[in-house]
Image (spheres, rainbow, N blue to C red):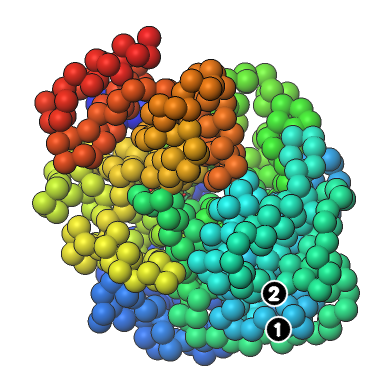
Amino acid sequence: MPDNIDNLLTEGRRFAPSPEFVDQAVAGTELAEQAAADRLAFWAEQARRHVTWATEPTETLDWSNPPFAKWFADGRLNVAYNCLDRHVEAGNGDRVALHFEGEPGDTRTVTYAELTADVKRAANALLDLGVGPGDRVVIYLPQICEAVTAMLAVARIGAVHSVVFGGFSAESLRSRIDDARATLVITADGGWRKGQVSPLKPAVDAALAVDGESTVRHVLVVRRGENEIDWTEGRDIWWHDAVAAAAAEHVAEPFEAEHPLFILYTSGTTGKPKGILHTSGGYLTQVAYTHRNVFDLHPETDVFWCTADVGWITGHSYVVYGPLANGATQVLYEGTPDSPEPGRWWSLIEKYGVTLFYTAPTAIRGFMKAGREIPQAHDLTSLRLLGSVGEPINPEAWMWYREVIGGDVAPIVDTWWQTETGAIMISPLPGVTETKPGSAQTPLPGISVDVVDDHGDPVSNGEGGLLVVPEPWPSMLRGIWGDPDRYVETYWSRFGDRYFAGDGARRDADGDIWLLGRVDDVMNVSGHRLSTAEIESALVSHPIVAESAVVGASDETTGQAVVAFVILRNKKKKSLSPEEAVAQLRTHVAQQIGAIARPRTVFLVDELPKTRSGKIMRRLLRDVAEGREVGDTTTLADTSVMTVISEGMR
Ligand code: PRX
């Protein structure tokens, strides 16, 4: 994307919302006016409007010890109560919370009253297992109702969840369990993916069998795939048994606004994932505020569908906390978009009358490739707003999304945010903004962002630079679990008290923001974050590897793809054919980290390009991986190395 930014900025198409949309829009221009008049008063008002507090906060922001923020610090609330009981108390217990659809076609409709009852019992089951406030619970589940129930049950008792995406390996799971010192794991026997049961429990067993004492005392197992699993007596408990034995009534106790809500691990620039910590009151305020205003949610009539897995931040904020805090009705789908037939998603939109749809550009590009006949075979006229998240959306995909899925009328909101920001930061407001294909455009009311040069000076319109957030925001991360120094160093050391997002951005002539992708060694593959360093260390842990370098190369469908350059150990080279070595290495990375990290391409090379100080020049490897003329090599210790690499690959 950075290479064609000059083309992007000549993008002249503009789409104003229709008068009918504007007429009924939740958010108008008044939000920006209120936020501009008094930013903190604006957030205090959002906290009142979107959250039911057991004790109303009198303080808004404490920024006396930057970068450690406190929002609404003297307020008290229960997050699960806000997502459940209060809707039932308001007379909306019969409203559908979840239209669940399993991949094999099984369905379950869960109302707010039923979800509240399920969560109460699950909360009691956790208490019976000795889980208490502040304890960490790892959740490793498919996209099923129990994932939502489990997260809310943990939150309800003031424990802290750490959801690990079901595609991560046993090794990744263990390192997250250990880092969080979790005492309980909630998993399933398996879940449905691409027409088959994909087992999960064996990965938990393998993770807990790793040498060294684990902190985990119990494993709660949801029955879903009905696949055969091993059982450790005394440690493993069926979820349905624990829930059936638990009391039905549970009164939600309030916790402080800054009480930890969850840890979510994400990739950084080193081999060790960062446990991003989010807390309660500020997080809930901003996810509810953004969910309502960015998606123009009318909870009585809309059907919302966010396709993200609960294992990612998008699933936390826009499957669980935002929609449920707002009393929305939503679709929860377990499986893959094209299983058992390529139109599965579109048939779900038709079946449930989805009105608001939120997905990632990679999925859109995948559908573009498969052809517009597939969605066009379905009635998608219920859709009235479309969202995009996770990676830059190219104008071509944006236009296809608008025309083919949105019937040329539904506004598109391209939402920029991160695991660290907790909620949407930059996005059009659908009833206000004239949208531009490919641009996230403007910070939301209450949020300030800037694009700065290397010295931290704001760039002019038409210029590019680095994205920073100059003012703290309610759903900001509160730290990296167990590592305050890394928190300061990663986000706050480059530009003082301005948050450094790690993204490049450019302002157009109107001052609107176009996101250009990461400027650090973090890759974005299909909207999922991966670290080059983590994959490199997985590769060198294989006995045949002497050295490796990994880059994210542009890919038409997945945005970026993992490309590895590997030097094999001399002795091992002879015993394997190059094809065998490559196949082993791809499998090894998938086993170490998870299938999402499996390199698309592995190049076996004799040298890697390094500076005189020994730093690998990934920029040059990216040139090779993307088939470009290799750029400036003058800072290399050995300038002939790129010729060796390029020739060796032919
Ligand atoms: O590079 C940006 C990209 O995704 C990164 C955050 O990844 P993660 O923490 O996994 O969260 C993804 C879902 C919120 C960002 O640093 N990104 C996210 N949304 C956009 C985006 N890039 C361009 N446009 C977006 N709308």
Name the element at disc 1. loop
Name the element at disc 2. loop
Per the image, the residue denoted by label 2 is 217
- Mark 1 surroundings within 10 Å by alpha-carbon count, few (fewer than 14), some (14 through 19), many (20 or more): few
x 42%, y 76%: residue: 45
Q: Which mark is residue 594?
A: none
Could you tell me how many numbered marks the image carries? 2
Q: Nearer the viewer, residue 205 or 521?
A: 205
Q: Amino acid at mark 1?
A: Gly
The disc, 2 or 1, on the residue closer to the chain's N-terminal end is 1
The yes-or-no answer for disc 1 within 8 Å of ligand 1 is: no
Q: Nearer the viewer, residue 296 or 150?
A: 150
Residue 386 x %, y %: 55, 41
- Whether residue 353 appears in this view of the structure is no
Q: Are marks 2 and 1 in contact (CB under 8 Å)?
A: yes
The C terminus is located in which quarter?
A: top left
State whether residue 583 is above or below residue 412.
above
Q: Residue furthest front?
A: 571
x 27%, y 50%: residue: 467
Q: Nearer the viewer, residue 46 or 569?
A: 569
The N terminus is located in which quarter?
A: top left
Per the image, the residue denoted by label 1 is 130
Q: Amino acid at mark 2?
A: Arg
Q: Nearer the viewer, mark 2 or mark 1?
A: 2
Q: Is residue 137 left or right of residue 447?
A: right
Residue 168 x %, y %: 60, 48
x 37%, y 14%: residue: 649
Toward which corner of the image does residue 536 lie, by quadrant? top left
